[in-house]
Image (cartoon, rainbow, N blue to C red):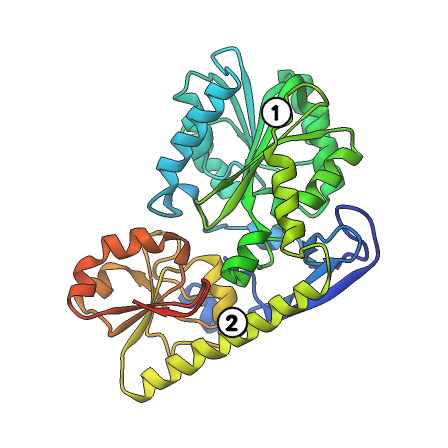
Amino acid sequence: MLTKNTACRDCGSSKLTLFLDLSDQPPANAFLTKEALADGHETRYPLKAYVCEDCQLVQLIDVVDLDTLFQDYVYLTAGAGPTTPKHFTEYAESIAKRFALGKNSFVVEIGSNDGLLLSAFQKCDVKKVLGVDPAKNVAKIANDRGTPTLAEPWGEAVAKRIAKEHGKADLIIGNNVVAHINDHQDLVRAVKALLAPKGAFVFEAPYLVDMFENLSFDTIYHEHLSCLAVRPLKRLFESHGLQVFDVRGKSVQGNSMRMFVGWPDAHEVHLRVPGFVNKEEGMNLNIVPSYHNLARRAERRVKETTDLLAKLKKEGKRIAGYGAPAKGNTLLNYAKIGPETLEYLTEELPTKIGKFSPGMHIPVVHVDVARKDPPDYLLVLAWNYLEKILEREDALRKRGTKFIVPIGEYLRVL
Protein backbone atom coordinates (compact mmCIF):
# COMPACT_ATOMS: atom_id res chain seq x y z
CA MET A 1 0.00 0.00 0.00
CA LEU A 2 1.25 3.46 -0.94
CA THR A 3 0.12 6.87 0.29
CA LYS A 4 1.21 10.25 -1.04
CA ASN A 5 1.91 13.24 1.17
CA THR A 6 0.89 16.67 -0.09
CA ALA A 7 2.61 18.74 2.60
CA CYS A 8 6.02 18.89 4.26
CA ARG A 9 6.17 16.59 7.30
CA ASP A 10 8.13 19.20 9.27
CA CYS A 11 6.54 22.57 8.52
CA GLY A 12 3.31 21.75 6.66
CA SER A 13 4.19 23.70 3.50
CA SER A 14 2.76 22.46 0.20
CA LYS A 15 5.77 23.85 -1.70
CA LEU A 16 7.59 20.59 -2.40
CA THR A 17 10.03 20.43 -5.32
CA LEU A 18 11.17 17.17 -6.93
CA PHE A 19 14.94 17.15 -7.47
CA LEU A 20 16.02 13.48 -7.74
CA ASP A 21 14.04 10.64 -9.34
CA LEU A 22 15.68 7.30 -8.53
CA SER A 23 13.01 5.40 -10.52
CA ASP A 24 10.51 2.85 -9.21
CA GLN A 25 12.25 0.43 -6.84
CA PRO A 26 11.26 -2.39 -4.47
CA PRO A 27 11.85 -1.78 -0.74
CA ALA A 28 15.61 -1.86 -0.17
CA ASN A 29 15.52 -4.57 2.50
CA ALA A 30 13.03 -6.81 0.67
CA PHE A 31 15.50 -9.57 -0.21
CA LEU A 32 13.94 -12.48 -2.10
CA THR A 33 14.05 -16.19 -1.39
CA LYS A 34 14.44 -18.62 -4.30
CA GLU A 35 10.72 -19.30 -4.11
CA ALA A 36 9.81 -15.61 -4.20
CA LEU A 37 12.19 -15.06 -7.12
CA ALA A 38 10.57 -17.93 -9.03
CA ASP A 39 7.12 -16.52 -8.25
CA GLY A 40 8.09 -13.39 -10.15
CA HIS A 41 5.95 -11.03 -8.09
CA GLU A 42 7.85 -8.00 -6.82
CA THR A 43 6.20 -4.65 -6.15
CA ARG A 44 8.06 -1.45 -6.96
CA TYR A 45 7.28 1.99 -5.62
CA PRO A 46 8.33 5.49 -6.70
CA LEU A 47 11.61 6.59 -5.11
CA LYS A 48 11.69 10.35 -5.58
CA ALA A 49 13.39 12.94 -3.38
CA TYR A 50 11.73 16.31 -2.82
CA VAL A 51 12.89 19.41 -0.96
CA CYS A 52 10.55 21.73 0.93
CA GLU A 53 10.94 25.27 -0.40
CA ASP A 54 10.09 26.74 3.01
CA CYS A 55 12.15 24.74 5.55
CA GLN A 56 14.40 22.74 3.17
CA LEU A 57 13.61 19.33 4.65
CA VAL A 58 14.57 16.67 2.08
CA GLN A 59 11.87 14.01 2.00
CA LEU A 60 10.00 11.29 0.16
CA ILE A 61 6.32 12.01 -0.33
CA ASP A 62 5.50 8.50 -1.61
CA VAL A 63 5.14 6.54 1.62
CA VAL A 64 5.12 2.73 1.65
CA ASP A 65 3.09 1.32 4.56
CA LEU A 66 4.93 -0.06 7.58
CA ASP A 67 3.61 -3.61 7.20
CA THR A 68 5.17 -3.84 3.74
CA LEU A 69 8.51 -2.45 4.90
CA PHE A 70 8.91 -4.24 8.22
CA GLN A 71 7.23 -7.63 7.80
CA ASP A 72 9.98 -10.29 8.17
CA TYR A 73 12.56 -7.50 8.43
CA VAL A 74 16.12 -8.63 7.64
CA TYR A 75 18.16 -5.78 9.18
CA LEU A 76 19.56 -6.53 12.63
CA THR A 77 21.74 -4.00 14.46
CA ALA A 78 23.84 -6.80 15.95
CA GLY A 79 24.95 -7.77 12.45
CA ALA A 80 24.92 -4.34 10.83
CA GLY A 81 28.66 -3.95 10.58
CA PRO A 82 32.01 -4.42 12.29
CA THR A 83 31.86 -1.15 14.23
CA THR A 84 28.24 -1.21 15.43
CA PRO A 85 28.52 -3.13 18.76
CA LYS A 86 31.53 -1.05 19.84
CA HIS A 87 29.76 2.16 18.83
CA PHE A 88 26.64 1.26 20.83
CA THR A 89 28.70 0.44 23.92
CA GLU A 90 30.50 3.79 23.74
CA TYR A 91 27.22 5.53 22.89
CA ALA A 92 25.46 4.14 25.97
CA GLU A 93 28.40 4.81 28.28
CA SER A 94 28.77 8.44 27.17
CA ILE A 95 25.04 9.21 27.41
CA ALA A 96 24.66 7.46 30.78
CA LYS A 97 27.58 9.48 32.13
CA ARG A 98 26.41 12.81 30.67
CA PHE A 99 22.92 12.53 32.15
CA ALA A 100 23.92 10.64 35.32
CA LEU A 101 21.70 7.66 34.47
CA GLY A 102 21.60 4.76 36.90
CA LYS A 103 19.47 1.99 38.36
CA ASN A 104 16.53 4.34 39.04
CA SER A 105 16.53 5.84 35.54
CA PHE A 106 14.07 4.93 32.78
CA VAL A 107 15.34 4.68 29.19
CA VAL A 108 13.03 4.20 26.19
CA GLU A 109 14.33 3.49 22.69
CA ILE A 110 12.37 4.27 19.52
CA GLY A 111 13.02 1.75 16.75
CA SER A 112 14.96 -0.48 19.13
CA ASN A 113 15.40 -3.35 16.63
CA ASP A 114 17.01 -6.37 18.32
CA GLY A 115 17.76 -4.46 21.54
CA LEU A 116 21.52 -4.12 21.08
CA LEU A 117 21.66 -0.46 22.18
CA LEU A 118 19.32 -0.95 25.14
CA SER A 119 21.35 -3.94 26.28
CA ALA A 120 24.37 -1.62 26.37
CA PHE A 121 22.43 0.67 28.73
CA GLN A 122 21.51 -2.34 30.86
CA LYS A 123 25.24 -3.01 31.24
CA CYS A 124 25.61 0.61 32.44
CA ASP A 125 23.41 -0.28 35.45
CA VAL A 126 20.24 1.18 33.91
CA LYS A 127 17.76 -1.48 35.01
CA LYS A 128 14.55 0.00 33.61
CA VAL A 129 14.57 0.00 29.80
CA LEU A 130 11.89 -0.42 27.15
CA GLY A 131 12.12 -0.72 23.39
CA VAL A 132 9.48 0.14 20.79
CA ASP A 133 9.82 -1.33 17.29
CA PRO A 134 7.28 -2.06 14.50
CA ALA A 135 9.05 -5.22 13.27
CA LYS A 136 7.53 -8.14 15.17
CA ASN A 137 10.28 -10.61 14.27
CA VAL A 138 13.12 -8.44 15.59
CA ALA A 139 11.13 -7.32 18.65
CA LYS A 140 10.81 -11.01 19.53
CA ILE A 141 14.59 -11.39 19.31
CA ALA A 142 15.00 -8.49 21.75
CA ASN A 143 12.45 -9.89 24.19
CA ASP A 144 14.06 -13.33 24.02
CA ARG A 145 17.40 -11.72 24.90
CA GLY A 146 15.96 -10.04 27.98
CA THR A 147 15.34 -6.54 26.62
CA PRO A 148 11.63 -5.64 27.06
CA THR A 149 10.24 -4.49 23.71
CA LEU A 150 6.81 -3.46 22.40
CA ALA A 151 6.19 -4.67 18.84
CA GLU A 152 4.38 -1.63 17.48
CA PRO A 153 5.09 1.70 15.76
CA TRP A 154 6.09 4.71 17.83
CA GLY A 155 3.42 7.37 18.28
CA GLU A 156 1.65 9.63 20.75
CA ALA A 157 -0.83 6.97 21.89
CA VAL A 158 1.97 4.48 22.61
CA ALA A 159 4.00 7.14 24.45
CA LYS A 160 1.05 8.10 26.65
CA ARG A 161 0.43 4.46 27.50
CA ILE A 162 4.08 3.94 28.44
CA ALA A 163 4.04 7.07 30.62
CA LYS A 164 0.90 5.87 32.38
CA GLU A 165 2.22 2.34 32.99
CA HIS A 166 5.92 3.05 33.63
CA GLY A 167 6.28 6.77 34.35
CA LYS A 168 8.14 9.49 32.47
CA ALA A 169 11.40 8.69 30.67
CA ASP A 170 14.72 10.20 31.73
CA LEU A 171 16.04 9.40 28.28
CA ILE A 172 14.29 8.73 24.99
CA ILE A 173 16.78 7.53 22.45
CA GLY A 174 16.66 6.68 18.77
CA ASN A 175 19.32 5.33 16.44
CA ASN A 176 18.73 5.77 12.71
CA VAL A 177 14.99 5.96 13.27
CA VAL A 178 13.72 9.56 13.02
CA ALA A 179 14.31 9.50 9.27
CA HIS A 180 12.02 6.44 9.09
CA ILE A 181 9.02 8.18 10.66
CA ASN A 182 6.40 9.70 8.35
CA ASP A 183 4.46 11.84 10.83
CA HIS A 184 7.02 14.12 12.48
CA GLN A 185 4.31 16.06 14.29
CA ASP A 186 3.15 12.85 16.00
CA LEU A 187 6.79 11.92 16.70
CA VAL A 188 7.35 15.15 18.65
CA ARG A 189 3.98 14.99 20.43
CA ALA A 190 4.92 11.47 21.54
CA VAL A 191 8.28 12.65 22.86
CA LYS A 192 6.55 15.44 24.80
CA ALA A 193 4.06 12.97 26.30
CA LEU A 194 6.82 10.74 27.69
CA LEU A 195 9.79 13.01 28.42
CA ALA A 196 10.56 13.82 32.07
CA PRO A 197 11.08 17.52 33.01
CA LYS A 198 14.88 17.15 33.05
CA GLY A 199 14.92 14.37 30.47
CA ALA A 200 16.53 14.33 27.03
CA PHE A 201 15.56 13.01 23.63
CA VAL A 202 18.78 11.94 21.89
CA PHE A 203 18.90 10.49 18.40
CA GLU A 204 21.38 9.71 15.66
CA ALA A 205 20.57 10.00 11.98
CA PRO A 206 22.32 10.23 8.62
CA TYR A 207 23.21 13.88 8.07
CA LEU A 208 22.20 15.72 4.91
CA VAL A 209 25.57 17.48 4.80
CA ASP A 210 27.20 14.09 4.17
CA MET A 211 25.02 13.61 1.10
CA PHE A 212 26.41 16.85 -0.32
CA GLU A 213 30.02 16.28 0.74
CA ASN A 214 30.29 12.56 -0.13
CA LEU A 215 27.49 12.24 -2.69
CA SER A 216 25.79 9.57 -0.58
CA PHE A 217 22.52 9.70 -2.53
CA ASP A 218 22.23 5.93 -2.05
CA THR A 219 21.04 6.56 1.53
CA ILE A 220 17.71 7.53 -0.05
CA TYR A 221 15.36 4.54 0.07
CA HIS A 222 11.76 3.90 1.07
CA GLU A 223 12.50 3.42 4.77
CA HIS A 224 14.38 6.73 4.90
CA LEU A 225 11.47 9.10 4.48
CA SER A 226 13.58 12.16 5.32
CA CYS A 227 17.21 13.26 4.95
CA LEU A 228 17.79 15.23 8.11
CA ALA A 229 19.55 18.51 8.79
CA VAL A 230 19.72 20.73 11.86
CA ARG A 231 17.88 23.77 10.46
CA PRO A 232 14.51 22.12 9.68
CA LEU A 233 14.65 19.92 12.80
CA LYS A 234 15.35 22.91 15.05
CA ARG A 235 12.35 24.68 13.57
CA LEU A 236 10.18 21.57 14.05
CA PHE A 237 11.04 21.05 17.73
CA GLU A 238 10.70 24.75 18.55
CA SER A 239 7.23 24.80 16.99
CA HIS A 240 6.25 22.22 19.63
CA GLY A 241 7.87 24.03 22.55
CA LEU A 242 11.02 21.90 22.73
CA GLN A 243 14.63 23.00 22.42
CA VAL A 244 17.63 21.57 20.57
CA PHE A 245 20.43 21.97 23.11
CA ASP A 246 23.31 20.16 21.45
CA VAL A 247 24.39 18.57 18.16
CA ARG A 248 27.43 16.43 17.47
CA GLY A 249 28.84 14.90 14.32
CA LYS A 250 29.46 11.13 14.30
CA SER A 251 31.24 8.85 11.82
CA VAL A 252 29.31 5.59 12.37
CA GLN A 253 27.11 4.47 9.41
CA GLY A 254 28.72 7.19 7.30
CA ASN A 255 28.78 10.75 8.58
CA SER A 256 25.77 11.15 10.85
CA MET A 257 24.64 13.60 13.50
CA ARG A 258 23.60 13.12 17.09
CA MET A 259 20.96 15.61 18.26
CA PHE A 260 19.96 16.41 21.84
CA VAL A 261 16.47 17.79 22.56
CA GLY A 262 14.81 18.78 25.82
CA TRP A 263 12.39 21.12 27.51
CA PRO A 264 13.31 24.85 27.36
CA ASP A 265 15.95 25.84 29.94
CA ALA A 266 16.28 22.24 31.20
CA HIS A 267 19.74 22.03 29.60
CA GLU A 268 22.35 24.59 28.62
CA VAL A 269 22.34 25.22 24.86
CA HIS A 270 25.75 24.45 23.36
CA LEU A 271 27.40 26.73 20.78
CA ARG A 272 27.59 23.73 18.44
CA VAL A 273 23.89 24.24 17.61
CA PRO A 274 24.27 27.60 15.82
CA GLY A 275 27.56 26.30 14.43
CA PHE A 276 25.78 23.48 12.58
CA VAL A 277 23.11 25.88 11.32
CA ASN A 278 25.76 28.28 10.01
CA LYS A 279 27.56 25.44 8.22
CA GLU A 280 24.36 24.34 6.48
CA GLU A 281 23.61 27.88 5.35
CA GLY A 282 27.23 28.31 4.24
CA MET A 283 26.77 25.26 1.98
CA ASN A 284 23.61 26.86 0.51
CA LEU A 285 21.37 24.10 1.81
CA ASN A 286 18.71 26.77 2.31
CA ILE A 287 18.19 27.30 -1.43
CA VAL A 288 16.53 24.89 -3.88
CA PRO A 289 19.07 25.11 -6.77
CA SER A 290 21.65 23.37 -4.55
CA TYR A 291 19.49 20.23 -4.60
CA HIS A 292 19.16 20.17 -8.38
CA ASN A 293 22.95 20.42 -8.57
CA LEU A 294 23.23 17.45 -6.18
CA ALA A 295 21.00 15.41 -8.50
CA ARG A 296 23.19 16.22 -11.51
CA ARG A 297 26.28 15.11 -9.58
CA ALA A 298 24.54 11.83 -8.67
CA GLU A 299 23.65 11.17 -12.30
CA ARG A 300 27.25 11.79 -13.39
CA ARG A 301 28.59 9.45 -10.70
CA VAL A 302 26.25 6.65 -11.78
CA LYS A 303 27.42 7.02 -15.39
CA GLU A 304 31.08 6.99 -14.29
CA THR A 305 30.46 3.82 -12.29
CA THR A 306 28.53 1.94 -14.97
CA ASP A 307 31.05 2.96 -17.66
CA LEU A 308 33.88 1.57 -15.52
CA LEU A 309 32.05 -1.70 -14.83
CA ALA A 310 31.19 -2.13 -18.52
CA LYS A 311 34.84 -1.57 -19.47
CA LEU A 312 36.04 -4.15 -16.93
CA LYS A 313 33.47 -6.74 -18.07
CA LYS A 314 34.53 -6.18 -21.68
CA GLU A 315 38.09 -6.96 -20.56
CA GLY A 316 36.84 -10.24 -19.09
CA LYS A 317 37.23 -9.23 -15.45
CA ARG A 318 35.24 -10.92 -12.69
CA ILE A 319 33.33 -8.46 -10.49
CA ALA A 320 31.22 -8.94 -7.34
CA GLY A 321 29.72 -6.63 -4.74
CA TYR A 322 31.06 -6.24 -1.21
CA GLY A 323 28.16 -6.01 1.21
CA ALA A 324 24.41 -6.12 0.65
CA PRO A 325 23.20 -3.05 2.58
CA ALA A 326 19.89 -1.35 1.85
CA LYS A 327 21.66 1.67 0.38
CA GLY A 328 23.52 -0.61 -2.01
CA ASN A 329 20.21 -1.67 -3.51
CA THR A 330 19.31 1.97 -4.19
CA LEU A 331 22.49 2.31 -6.25
CA LEU A 332 22.13 -1.06 -7.99
CA ASN A 333 18.52 -0.42 -9.01
CA TYR A 334 19.09 3.19 -10.07
CA ALA A 335 22.17 2.26 -12.10
CA LYS A 336 20.60 -0.99 -13.39
CA ILE A 337 23.57 -3.07 -12.21
CA GLY A 338 22.50 -6.72 -12.17
CA PRO A 339 23.87 -10.30 -12.08
CA GLU A 340 25.24 -9.97 -15.60
CA THR A 341 27.73 -7.48 -14.09
CA LEU A 342 28.10 -8.60 -10.47
CA GLU A 343 28.43 -12.36 -9.87
CA TYR A 344 27.19 -12.02 -6.28
CA LEU A 345 27.00 -9.76 -3.21
CA THR A 346 28.91 -10.75 -0.08
CA GLU A 347 27.35 -10.71 3.40
CA GLU A 348 27.79 -12.03 6.91
CA LEU A 349 24.20 -11.45 8.05
CA PRO A 350 22.38 -14.83 8.04
CA THR A 351 19.03 -13.20 7.25
CA LYS A 352 20.35 -12.11 3.83
CA ILE A 353 22.66 -14.98 2.82
CA GLY A 354 21.05 -17.36 0.31
CA LYS A 355 18.59 -14.73 -0.88
CA PHE A 356 18.58 -12.37 -3.86
CA SER A 357 18.85 -8.60 -3.88
CA PRO A 358 15.57 -6.73 -4.39
CA GLY A 359 15.03 -5.48 -7.92
CA MET A 360 18.25 -6.64 -9.56
CA HIS A 361 18.16 -10.21 -8.17
CA ILE A 362 21.87 -10.64 -7.50
CA PRO A 363 22.59 -13.71 -5.31
CA VAL A 364 23.82 -12.99 -1.77
CA VAL A 365 26.58 -15.26 -0.49
CA HIS A 366 28.84 -15.42 2.54
CA VAL A 367 31.94 -13.24 2.26
CA ASP A 368 34.08 -16.40 2.47
CA VAL A 369 33.09 -17.14 -1.14
CA ALA A 370 35.11 -14.12 -2.27
CA ARG A 371 37.97 -15.00 0.05
CA LYS A 372 38.25 -18.55 -1.30
CA ASP A 373 37.92 -17.63 -4.98
CA PRO A 374 38.84 -13.92 -5.28
CA PRO A 375 37.21 -11.91 -8.06
CA ASP A 376 39.25 -9.28 -9.90
CA TYR A 377 37.16 -6.44 -8.50
CA LEU A 378 34.74 -5.87 -5.63
CA LEU A 379 32.24 -3.01 -5.81
CA VAL A 380 32.03 -1.70 -2.25
CA LEU A 381 28.36 -1.13 -1.42
CA ALA A 382 28.94 -0.99 2.34
CA TRP A 383 31.22 2.02 1.77
CA ASN A 384 30.58 3.44 5.26
CA TYR A 385 32.78 0.63 6.62
CA LEU A 386 35.48 1.07 3.97
CA GLU A 387 38.41 1.47 6.36
CA LYS A 388 37.47 -1.67 8.29
CA ILE A 389 36.79 -3.59 5.08
CA LEU A 390 40.20 -2.81 3.63
CA GLU A 391 41.81 -3.79 6.92
CA ARG A 392 39.89 -7.08 7.14
CA GLU A 393 40.38 -7.98 3.49
CA ASP A 394 44.09 -7.21 3.27
CA ALA A 395 44.74 -10.80 2.14
CA LEU A 396 42.32 -10.34 -0.77
CA ARG A 397 44.09 -7.16 -1.84
CA LYS A 398 47.46 -8.89 -1.67
CA ARG A 399 46.08 -11.56 -4.00
CA GLY A 400 45.22 -8.87 -6.54
CA THR A 401 41.56 -8.04 -5.90
CA LYS A 402 40.83 -4.33 -6.32
CA PHE A 403 38.06 -2.47 -4.52
CA ILE A 404 35.82 -0.02 -6.41
CA VAL A 405 34.29 2.65 -4.16
CA PRO A 406 31.36 4.35 -5.94
CA ILE A 407 30.35 6.72 -3.15
CA GLY A 408 32.56 9.53 -1.89
CA GLU A 409 34.02 12.77 -3.18
CA TYR A 410 35.07 10.90 -6.31
CA LEU A 411 34.97 7.36 -7.78
CA ARG A 412 37.93 5.36 -6.45
CA VAL A 413 39.66 2.09 -7.31
CA LEU A 414 41.85 0.87 -4.46
Is 400 displayed left or right of 218 in the figure? Answer: left
**How far across and down, in percent of the image, does residue 89 sit?**
39, 30
Q: Judge whether residue 31 can be spotted in this image.
A: no
Tell whether label 1 touches label 2 (CB within 8 Å).
no
Q: Nearer the viewer, residue 43 or 347?
A: 347
Packing grade of label 1 (10 A; few <14, some 14-19, many >=20) is: many
Residue drawn 71% across the image and 45% down it: 232
**How far across and down, in percent of the image, does residue 370 sit?**
24, 65
CA gap between label 2 and label 1 equals 39 Å
Residue drawn 77% across the image and 56% down it: 5
Examine the rendered structure and indicate whether residue 344 appears above or below residue 276: below
Examine the rendered structure and indicate whether residue 412 appears above or below residue 140: below
Examine the rendered structure and indicate whether residue 375 appears above or below residue 30: below
SS for callout 2: helix
Residue that badge 2 annotates:
333
Numbered circle sitting on residue 200? 1
Q: Amino acid at mark 1?
A: Ala
Specify which label sits upstream in the sequence, 2 or 1: 1
Residue drawn 69% across the image and 44% down it: 231
**How far across and down, in percent of the image, does residue 210 sit?**
53, 54
What is the residue that sits farthest to the bottom in this orientation?
314
Q: Nearer the viewer, residue 405 or 364?
A: 405
Q: Amino acid at mark 2?
A: Asn
Is 163 displayed left or right of 176 in the figure? Answer: right
